[in-house]
């Protein structure tokens, strides 16, 4: 009998050894006790995180990485959360446009798609609305996340105070940039800031100073809260920065010549940003060529307008044309 028991123990040992052969060995690392995650392990961790966020309705943040057309004709925004693909239907992106007789639904969808295209690369908050464990697909809503943020930051607390209020400096996300305007998202509310409110310096092209995806500081000028769906915010960037225009203007001397760049031309008036940090206005040009935007020019000061903090004068010649 003892011999039989010994044979059984040996058989069990052999089976265990065979089973061990089928177990993948851990990654052999250069440093002792170090751990290296495989792509599969990373995806498992992220998927677990998405599952928890779905259950708790937690707000997550990802990057708008793509726009795709569905077979049925609809549009979806593709968000990447830590390399995981999340889909948001266009209706859940909260791109609100007023539908009127002039703008029918078809044209409104085209405009929404254009706005969405300008937002590519920006940060997006979202709440997961649906999840499929087998295909590991996720459907989410930006609108739900924005409404939740609005409740937190714009509605009064027990003391009657709101976190986002007039004159407060807050961080905002740049979600779209055009030549003369920057669109930002401030805790669930979108706001357009015109070029004149972006900097004390005259700005010819906002795309040279701002880009989609960055975070900037803005000052809240006014807030109007009618409901969660109807909140209007006005903000600027320049009041956060110090105004050095008056100090720099003292560097200008009448009949002095200074180099600068043309920022804009309107009805024959040329607006120039001098390299010494002064805004300048020219009503005439002595060069045979017509100045254009972004041209580098030689500017002669004939008068100092201290009330408007600008130098007034003329363009003596075009140093270099920007073609």
Image (cartoon, rainbow, N blue to C red):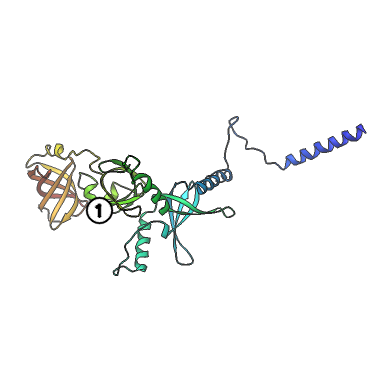
In the image, taking residue 262 as reference, residue 137 lies left or right, namely right
In the image, taking residue 39 as reference, residue 187 lies left or right, namely left
Q: Specify the quadrant of the image occupied by residue 279.
A: top left
Question: Could you tell me which quadrant the N terminus lies in?
Answer: top right
Farthest residue to the top: give it: 32
- 4 lies above or below 229: above
Q: Specify the quadrant of the image occupied by residue 74.
A: bottom left
| Front-lying residue, 105 or 282 | 105
Secondary structure found at label 1: loop
- 100 lies above or below 191: below
Farthest residue to the right: give it: 1
Q: Which residue is mark 1?
A: 180
| Front-lying residue, 60 or 54 | 54
In the image, taking residue 112 as reference, residue 253 lies left or right, namely left
Which residue is depicted at the point 15% across and 38% down?
248
Structural crowding at the residue carrying mark 1, measured as other residues with C-alpha within 10 Å and reported as few (<14), some (14–19) or many (≥20): some
* Residue 269 placement (x, y as % from top left): 13, 54
| Front-lying residue, 238 or 315 | 238
* Residue 97 placement (x, y as % from top left): 33, 61
Farthest residue to the front: give it: 158
| Front-lying residue, 102 or 270 | 102
* Residue 282 placement (x, y as % from top left): 11, 50
* Residue 323 placement (x, y as % from top left): 24, 55
In the image, taking residue 280 as reference, residue 37 lies left or right, namely right
Count all numbered tags in the image, as a single digit: 1
């Amino acid at each position: 009998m003892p011999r039989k028991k010994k044979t059984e123990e040996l058989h069990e040992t052999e089976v265990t050894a065979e089973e061990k052969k089928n177990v993948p060995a851990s990654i052999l690392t250069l440093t002792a006790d170090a751990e290296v995650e495989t792509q599969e392990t990373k995806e498992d961790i992220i998927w677990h995180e998405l599952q928890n966020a779905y259950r708790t309705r937690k707000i997550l943040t990802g990057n708008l990485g793509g726009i795709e057309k569905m077979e049925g004709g609809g549009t979806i925004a593709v968000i990447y959360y830590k390399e995981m693909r999340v889909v948001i239907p266009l209706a859940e992106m909260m791109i609100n446009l007023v539908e009127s007789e002039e703008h029918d639904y078809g044209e409104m969808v085209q405009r929404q798609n254009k706005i969405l295209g300008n937002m590519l690369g920006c940060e997006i908050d979202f709440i997961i609305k649906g999840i499929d464990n087998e295909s590991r697909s996720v459907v989410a809503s930006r609108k739900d996340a924005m409404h939740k943020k609005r409740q937190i930051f714009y509605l009064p607390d027990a003391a009657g105070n709101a976190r986002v209020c007039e004159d407060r400096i807050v961080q905002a996300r740049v979600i779209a940039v055009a030549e003369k305007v920057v669109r930002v998202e401030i805790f669930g509310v979108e706001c357009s800031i015109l070029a004149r409110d972006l900097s004390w310096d005259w700005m010819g092209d906002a795309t040279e100073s701002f880009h989609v995806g960055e975070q900037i500081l803005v000052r809240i000028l006014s807030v109007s809260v009618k409901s969660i769906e109807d909140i209007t915010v006005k903000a600027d960037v320049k009041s956060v920065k110090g105004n050095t225009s008056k100090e720099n203007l003292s560097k200008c001397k009448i009949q002095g010549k200074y180099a600068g760049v043309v920022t804009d031309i309107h009805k024959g008036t040329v607006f120039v940003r001098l390299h010494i940090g002064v805004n300048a206005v020219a009503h005439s040009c002595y060069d045979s060529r017509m100045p254009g935007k972004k041209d580098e020019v030689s500017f002669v000061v004939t008068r100092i307008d201290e009330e408007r903090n600008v130098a007034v004068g003329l363009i003596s010649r075009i140093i270099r044309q920007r073609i």
